[in-house]
Amino acid sequence: MDPKTVSNICWAFGRQKVWSQNFMAALEAKPQAIAKNARCKEISNICWSYGKLVMKSPKLFAAVHNRIEEDSTFRGRLKPVEIAVIAWTFSRLGHEAPALMQHIKNDIEIICDSAKQPQELGMLASAFATSATETEMYTVFHHILKKQEFIDRGMRNPSVPGEMTTAMAVTGKADCTVFLSSVDQKMGGWLARSGTSSTISQLLVGFAVQNVVPEALTRHLTREADFFLNRVKNFDVKHVAKITWALASLGMADERKELVTKYWGHVMQRLYDGTARSAADQGSGSWAHVPPAVLVQLVQTEMFAKEKGVELSPRVPDEALDLVENYLRKVQPRNEYLTVAYSNALARMGFAHETYAYVDEHERMQTFRSDIVNAEKKICINFCGPSMFLTDVSGDKPPEESQFHRGRETGDVVARRRLMRSWGWHVIDVPYFHDKMLGEEGDVKDAKREAYMLGRFKHLGLEAELNEAK
C-alpha cells in the first residue's frame, strides 16, 4: 500500500475516531518504510490520526523523528501546519523529540509568520507547554503572542483560544492578559451560545489562573444560563464544575453570584443522580466515581461563596469530604527548603509556630494549608515558588536574550490570600525571588532572613509577636 493511501486511511480513522487493529499493526511492522517514503503532508496526516486516537507508536514516531533530524531537505519542506501537527502529536503522546523542538525554536519567527491558520500556533503552544525546556517554551510563547492580530482573525474556531489558553495561560503560566481580554471581547457572546462546556471551562480556568475577570463572557453566560445548561445537559460534569469554581474563585461579585448558584445546583444534581445510579446498579451509592480534583474544587467553591455570604445548596456531602481529606493527605508540601530555613529563623526570633498546618474556616473539613502557622495569633506565612507567578513574555526581546521576568501572582494565590484574610488571618506571602536577593547561604543570609521577616511583621503591625523585635 503506497504512503498516500495509508495517509488517507489514517486521516479517515482520526476523523471518525475509530481504528482497525490489523491496519495499525501493519503500520507498526514497517515504520521505517513509511517514514522514509511518505511525503511531508502524508506523515503529518498519519501522526495527526495517532494524536486524535491517543494511540502510541514508538517505532513509527522514532522513525519520523530520525528523518526530521537527519534529512535537512525533508525538514526544510515541512510547512508550519505539518510541523505543528507532528509536534502536537509527539507532545500529546509523550514521545520526546529534541531535534524537532530545537528546529521549531530556531525557526519559530519564520514559522509564525508563515502560518496559514491560528490553529497551527495553538498546536505549537500546546506542544511546547508540556514537552520543552522553560527557555524553549517561553521563546515560542513570546513569538506566538506577537501574532495577536493574526490570532484574532481565527477566533471563530473555538479550539484555537481553548488550546492556547490551556497551554500558555494555565500550563505555561505566561502572562496572557491581552490575549484573554481579546477572547472575552470578541468571543464572549458566541461562546455562551455555541461553545462546548470543555472549551468554556478551559478558558475560564485560564481567566482564573491569570486573575482576569471575563466581563463579557460572564454577562453572556448569565443571560444564556438556562439555554447553555439545557444545551450541555449531557456534559462531562467536571467541565461545568471547573466553570463554577473559576467564576467563584475570581470573587463572588453580584454579576457572578446568580450564575455560580445556578451552575452549582446543576452540577450537584448531576453528581447526586450519578451516585443514585451507582446505588441502583451496585447496591450502594458512592461519590468515589467523582475525580478527587473535582471534589476539591467543589469544596473550595463553597468557601468562595460563603466568603460573600452566599450559601450554596445542596452542599457537598460528608462522604465526599472524607474522600477529599484522604486525597489531600497524599499531596506533598511544596517549598520545603524555604519552609525549614524560615522556620529556623523565626524560632530564633521567638515566634511560636507549626509547619504545614491547615488554616481553613470550613466547619466540616480543611483544604487550605500554609507553610508556617501560628493559629492562636492567626498568622500564616506562605512561600511562593516560580509556579505561583506569571511570566511576562511580551517584551521586545525573546526570553533567551533576557532574564525571565516573574510578574503578577497567579489567581489561585490571590484567591487564597483573599479568602484567608476574610477569615481574619494575617497573611504573609514570601516570593522565592525575595529570598534569592538575600545572597548565598550562610550565617550572613540567616541574619538577613531574620531582618526580612522582622520587616514583613512590622508592615502588618505584628512586630510585638517577635521576642527580638526592638
Image (spheres, rainbow, N blue to C red):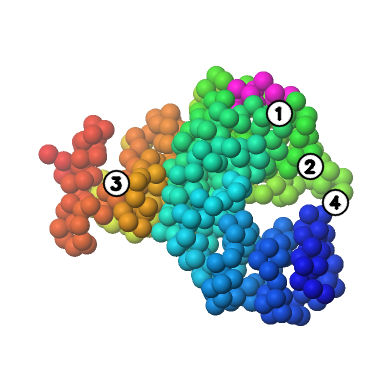
Label 4, label 1: how far apart the Cα atoms are: 38 Å
Q: Quadrant of residue 274?
A: top right
Provide the secondary structure element on which disc 1 rests. helix
| Sequence-wise first label, 3 or 1 | 1
Label 2, label 1: how far apart the Cα atoms are: 27 Å
Amino acid bearing label 4: Gln
Residue at screen point 38% across, 34% down? 425
Q: Mark 1 and mark 3 in contact (Cβ < 8 Å)?
A: no
- Picture quarter with the N terminus: bottom right
Circle 4 or circle 1, nearest the eye: 1
- What is the span of residues highlighted in magenta in the rendered image? 217-226
Circle 3 or circle 2, nearest the eye: 2
Specify whether residue 356 is in view: no
Circle 3 or circle 4, nearest the eye: 4
Q: Is residue 198 magenta?
A: no
Q: Position of residue 54 (x, y in %)?
A: 71, 61
Circle 2 or circle 1, nearest the eye: 1
Q: Mark 1 and mark 4 in contact (Cβ < 8 Å)?
A: no
Circle 4 packing at 10 Å, graded few (<14), some (14-19), many (20+), is: few
Circle 3 packing at 10 Å, graded few (<14), some (14-19), many (20+), is: some
- Total labels: the figure holds 4
Q: Is residue 220 magenta?
A: yes
Circle 3 or circle 1, nearest the eye: 1
Q: Which SS type dominates the magenta stretch? A: helix
What residue sits right under mark 2 in the picture? 274
Q: Position of residue 381 (x, y in %)?
A: 34, 44
Amino acid bearing label 3: Ala
Provide the secondary structure element on which disc 3 rests. loop
What residue sits right under mark 3 in the picture? 352
Label 3, label 1: how far apart the Cα atoms are: 55 Å
- Picture quarter with the C terminus: top left
What residue sits right under mark 1 in the picture? 193
